[in-house]
Image (cartoon, rainbow, N blue to C red):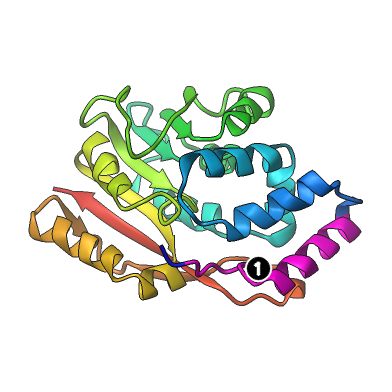
Amino acid sequence: MSQSHPTADPAFLDRLIAAYEHYRGVLNPRQKKGIRMIFSDLSGDNQAVSQNYDIVAPFYDDLLNFMDYQTPTKLTEIVSKFLDLEDTNLSIFDAGTGTGLLGEYIRQAGFRGKLVGVDISPESIQYIQSYRSGIYDWVTVGDITNLLEIPDASFDVVVSAGVIGLAPQESLDEILRVTKSQGLIAYSLNQNRYDSEDFWGTKHESLRNKNLWQNIEGYPEKHTYYANQDLGLSSYFYIFSFRKC
C-alpha cells in the first residue's frame, strides 16, 4: 500500500505537534506518538489502526478542530443536498465513526432519522457513548470490511469520512451490501492515494460495469483537507458520491 498521505512528512508532524501544544498545552510522549501514528502509519493493519486511534480518541476532536478538518463539513453538505433531513423514516450508516464528529454535524444539520455507526477503535466508541450520547441511535466496535451484524440493504445512506483508503477496497463491497437500492453512498478518499493507486479507480469502474452503483453527476469533488492555513499544509481529498443500482 502506498504511504502517501497529506501529513506523512515528519517535518510537518513536528510543526503540527508544536503548534497544537502552543494552542492546547504540553502533550505527553504517548499522545505525541499517537498523533504521528494516525497521520503516518497507513499499514491498514486493524490492530495497529485500533491502537493508534485509541490513543488519540480523548483529544481527537480538539486536534481536528484546531486543524479545521473539512471532510465532515463537506459530507454533511452532500447529505443535506440529497436528503429530506426531517424525514424520520430515513436511516444513515456512518462507516468508521471515529469519535462521532460526522454524526454530530449531520444531526446539527437537522437530520431526524436513524443514525448508526461502527468503528474499529473501542476508545472512540466509548468517547461517543460518553460525550455524544443521543447523536447515534446505535454505535458499536466493528470492522467495515466485515459487517456481519448488519443485514443486506439496511440503510438509505452510507457515509464515511477519512476511512476509505486506510480501510481496504473490500470495504466498498460491504458498504454497497448494507445500502438500500437507490440509496446514497458518499465517502472521502485522499487525492494522492486515489491518483497513485490505480486499483481504486479500477474498483470504482468495476462496480459501475457490474451495474452495482452509478456516479452522481458532478462527483468526485476535490476539497482541501485542512483550512488552518497557519499549518503550511496544502493537501486534498476527493468526495465520491454514488447511487446504488
Q: Quadrant of residue 95?
A: top left
By secondary structure, the bulk of the magenta-drawn segment is best described as helix
- Is 6 on the left or on the right of 193, as rendered? right
**Residue 78 seen in this snapshot:** yes
Is residue 16 shown in magenta? yes
Q: Which residue is mark 1?
A: 227
Residue sitting nearer the eye, 78 or 195: 195
Query: Is residue 179 something one can see in this rendering?
Result: no
**At 24% across and 45% down in the image, what residue appears?**
173
Q: Please, is residue 56 above or below residue 142 in the view? A: below
Query: Observer-nearest residue: 233 or 110?
Result: 233
Examine the structure image and report whether residue 4 is included in the region drawn in magenta.
yes
Q: Residue placed farthest to the left in the image?
A: 210
Figure quadrant of residue 225: bottom right
Q: Position of residue 25 (x, y in %)?
A: 91, 51
Q: What segment carries the magenta color?
A: 3-23
* Image quarter in which the N terminus is found: bottom left
Which residue sits at x=32%, y=67%? 219
Residue count near mark 1 (Cα–Cα under 10 Å), binned few <14, some 14–19, many ≥20: some
- As helix, strand or loop, the secondary structure at mark 1 comes to loop
* Number of numbered labels in the structure image: 1
Q: In this view of the protein, which residue sits in the foreground, 238 or 73?
A: 238
Q: Is residue 118 above or below residue 168?
A: above
Q: Position of residue 31 (x, y in %)?
A: 77, 46
Amino acid bearing label 1: Ala
Q: Residue at x 22, y 51 (%)?
A: 243
Above or below residue 32? Residue 136 is: above
Residue 117: x %, y % from top left? 46, 32
